[in-house]
Amino acid sequence: MKKQSTWDIIKRLFVIGMKFRSWFIVTLIISIVLSVISTYRPYLTMQIVDTDIIQLRDKKLMMRHIYILVALVFGETILNFFLVYFSNFISQNVIRDIRERLYHKLIYFRTSFFDKTAIGQLVTRAVGDVETIATVYTDGFLMVFGDILRIVFVLFMMFQVDVHLSYISLAILPLMLLITRFFQKRLKKAFGDERTWTSNQNSFVQERLAGMSLVQVFNRQKSEFKKFDDINITLKEALLKTVFIFSLFFPVVELISSLFIGFILFYGGFISITAGAVIAFIQFISMLIRPLRQIADRFNNIQRGIVGAERVLGVMDEDFAMPNHGTIAKSHFEGKIEFRNVHFAYDEKQEVLKGISFKVNPGETVAIVGATGAGKSTIISLITRLYDINSGKILLDDVELKNYELYNLRSHIGVVLQDVFLFHGSIFENLSFGDESVTLEKIKSVAKDIEVDHFIESLPGGYEYVVRERGSSISLGQRQLLSFLRAYLSDPKILILDEATSSIDQESEKLIQRATEKITKNRTSIIIAHRLSTIVNADKIIVMEHGKIVEEGKHEDLLEKGGYYSTLYKSQLKVGVAAN
Ligand SMILES: Nc1ncnc2c1ncn2[C@@H]1O[C@H](COP(=O)(O)OP(=O)(O)OP(=O)(O)O)[C@@H](O)[C@H]1O
């Protein structure tokens, strides 16, 4: 991630905020009017005391001025409401915009990014960090501008009242700036640590909650709790560090302001000024100190927002999207697939596919078998271009994959992944998966086609049955059947089935087998098979070992050959017989 300076981040946030410039201008005008009103008030008070009461003893004039004063106070209250509301309105709109951009960016990131990044960390970025950016707008630009404006106006009015005292008051400005700067630097680091550990904790909790059954079955509650507690303690320490700096900052500022007011009053006593001027000056001093302290306080909040923004903008700056330079977009594919000496590695350390070559003719069903970790699922990820190959060629209808427009290419490929993922939502929502052209009627008829209608209708609510997160409320076999249906619905020209490794009950197994036969008909199909019984009829079987193809042929031929496949088949047969 490229390091950005605080100033760069502020500039970028300002540019993003400019999308709502008309609201900015309205809020700015309110802020200016407020500054004028609030600084005029002490001046008017001085006039009431010195002129109306002491000098002229004019009650009528005094009452008129008091009415104006009351009107000003009410006006200030109303304007303050709008100032806070509008600046929050802007900030909420801006962060909605940032959230949208971030999520949009993320959903186009390539799979390898998610391999390397902890999901909890991304959740912290997308939710927590974005939230803190809001403070840059609520406490930020407009408020700081308002505060500065108020300081300028207060100083101006002070000089109208008493030049001597005004000069003395000026000394508070550099002092406050120095203190703010001192704390600001320390706070930036503390906020950074705080966010890092929050994100670590989110990742940890997210992962453990997802894998809770594993933790419980292995009785690892104690050790997992210990790990959690370690992170928790570090997070607490990071948080306390920020609290410490804050707790020190406020009393120091308070102390300086009180000493200053005391000094100003003491000094004021030695030079002759009117009673009204003293009253006005006391108000001016607190009016000067409040925005100064608020600026310091706001800077702290802005600092937090900037740390959040640095992380969010960092992710947004990454260009992790899969390159999509292909221009060929087809409405129909023949479905011929060819791998030519394909080499691929997820990372530099280990080559997973070591020169794979094979062909699948249109309409054929090809099965890939082999030991676990041989590289079978990787082949699927390459056909769907979740990853790009290191060398060699993958051709679809004799054209290299990368020459096709990526999303057009994927729209012709249906995939049933090994680890079936269902989202929290109804069965209907999971099956249509955002495709508005998929109606309930269509789903029902397709489900009937591959004989999964009975199982869905037997669920409480049928197609409206709500699947819990990750599909945990329905069985593995049922999840696979739904996944079959999901792939079949899009009527893809190429179908890829990655069989789940875990065994399922015989009833589901039969259903899956029948469904497989139906959905592979008339389309190019690649089946990554773990149960060899499902692929005896395949047009071709590719046998893989350690990232290489070691055998290739029909079931009978491979059995006759008596090589790796026949050993694998016979051993599975034995297990099957034993199980029965
Ligand atoms: N996202 C990934 N990042 C890094 N390495 C990976 C990733 N996915 C798989 N691998 C590695 O690549 C190799 C091949 O994995 P692959 O999933 O293709 O095997 P497989 O033959 O499908 O295995 P199985 O039958 O268990 O599903 C394995 O060594 C695995 O550890």
Image: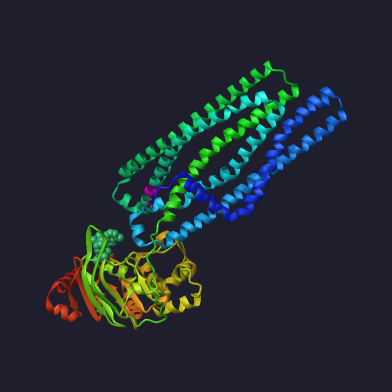
Give the colouring mode of the picture.
rainbow
**Is residue 128 visible to the viewer in this orientation of the structure?**
no
**Quadrant position of the C terminus in the picture:** bottom left
In the picture, measured across the screen, residue 207 lies left or right of residue 564, that is: right
Q: Position of residue 203 (x, y in %)?
A: 38, 49
Q: Position of residue 96 (x, y in %)?
A: 54, 55
Q: Which residues are magenta?
A: 202-206
Q: Nearer the viewer, residue 397 or 156?
A: 156
In the image, residue 554 sits, relative to residue 242, either above or below, namely below
In the picture, measured across the screen, residue 344 lies left or right of residue 306, that is: left
Q: Nearer the viewer, residue 254 or 526?
A: 254
How many tags in the picture?
Answer: 0
Ligand 1 appears in which quadrant? bottom left
Q: Position of residue 136 (x, y in %)?
A: 53, 45
**Residue 338 lies within the magenta run:** no
Residue at 50 percent across and 44 percent down: it is 305
Q: Quadrant of residue 30?
A: top right
Residue at 38 percent across and 60 percent down: it is 320
